[in-house]
Amino acid sequence: MARKGLGRGLDAILGEQGAAPETSERRRDGVQMIPIGDIAPDPDQPRKMFRDEQLDELAASIRARGILQPILVRPRSDTGKHLIIAGERRWRASQRAGIHEMPALVRNIDPGASAELALIENVQREDLNPMEEADAYARIRDQYDRKPGDIADAVGKSRSHIANMLRLTQLPDEVRAMVSAGELSMGHGRALLSADDPVALAKEVVGKGLSVRETEKRAAGAVARAPKETGDETPAKKPSSGGAKDADTKSLERDLEAALGLSVAIEHTKKGGTVTLTYDTLDQLDDICRRLMGSAV
């Protein structure tokens, strides 16, 4: 699949920002005044939540100054309508403002590149909540065969950030909903991944207003108690001295996870200890091997 637009951002495609006059030159470049009823949101748009107060503010601005930048759309041959690639918030606000048509830059872009551009716009403008961002990365990885490194380059984020966000997709639905609603932060979500019962601990975190550090301690404590409660004498992870990890060890684990983009577990023993790196994809395994062998990443 051709990687159209990958890493370029929207400015390179939209051109200069500002008003979109209805000149023949601009029309040759793809800008059209399209009836709002002929425009539809892309069901694969990464952003799912739109705040009413923000839409109302944007609608008031549109009434006063008009639409200062065209939205980006792609034609849909089966319906004759256009799907939004970037600018759904402007489209929704224009409906509230009573606008009947709006300037749009029409581009024949394949669905994969369209999804990437929609993600780039939202991430660059910080419009997504953590779960929307995580799900968007996962969809581009799975549906459009993009490696985490490619996604990182496209959106201007580090590989470790992409890897950490992708891990959030492993959370139970009930916890995901709490993260989406802003009841839990991304840091809380990451901490809950290691909990024996993420849903129960998430409810406790919300109910008691626990910090990320406190959540990490409770998650580690649950893991430490699990072998004793179940009678398992050969646990996969055996904590040092039979207790929860100390704050310094947990802090070091977090630092390593941020640097590597992987789940890291440090276990101390009387004769030394172990460092366990957990990978989710073969790409991550390849990256680990390159780092350990001293090759450039």
Image (cartoon, helix red, strand yellow):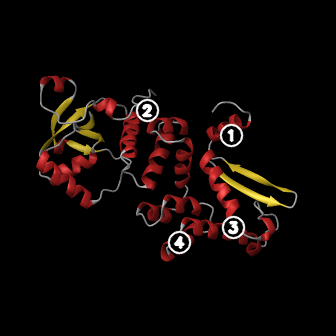
Q: Residue at x 11, y 49 (%)?
A: 64
User: Separation of disc 1 and disc 3 at Cα?
Assistant: 26 Å
User: Separation of disc 3 and disc 2 at Cα?
Assistant: 40 Å
Between residue 44 and residue 97, name the one nearer to us: 97
Of circles 3 and 4, which is in front? 4
Residue 104 appears in view = yes
Tell me the amino acid under the disc marked 2: Gly
The residue at which mark 2 appears reads as 7
Question: Does dot 2 land on a helix, a strand or a loop?
Answer: loop
Indicate the position of residue 247 as horizontal and vertical percent values: 67, 65
Indicate the position of residue 161 as horizontal and vertical percent values: 53, 47
The residue at which mark 4 appears reads as 210
Marks 2 and 1, the one that precedes in the sequence:
2
Q: Residue at x 65, y 37 (%)?
A: 287
- Above-or-below relation of 244 to 124: below
Of circles 3 and 2, which is in front? 2
Q: Residues within 10 Å of mark 2 (few under 14, many from 20)?
A: some
Marks 2 and 4, the one that precedes in the sequence:
2
Q: Residue furthest right?
A: 271
Question: Does dot 4 land on a helix, a strand or a loop?
Answer: loop
Residue 261 appears in view = no
> What numbered label is drawn on residue 223?
3
Q: Quadrant of the C terminus?
A: top right
- Above-or-below relation of 220 to 151: below
> What numbered label is drawn on residue 288?
1
Between residue 2 and residue 15, name the one nearer to us: 15
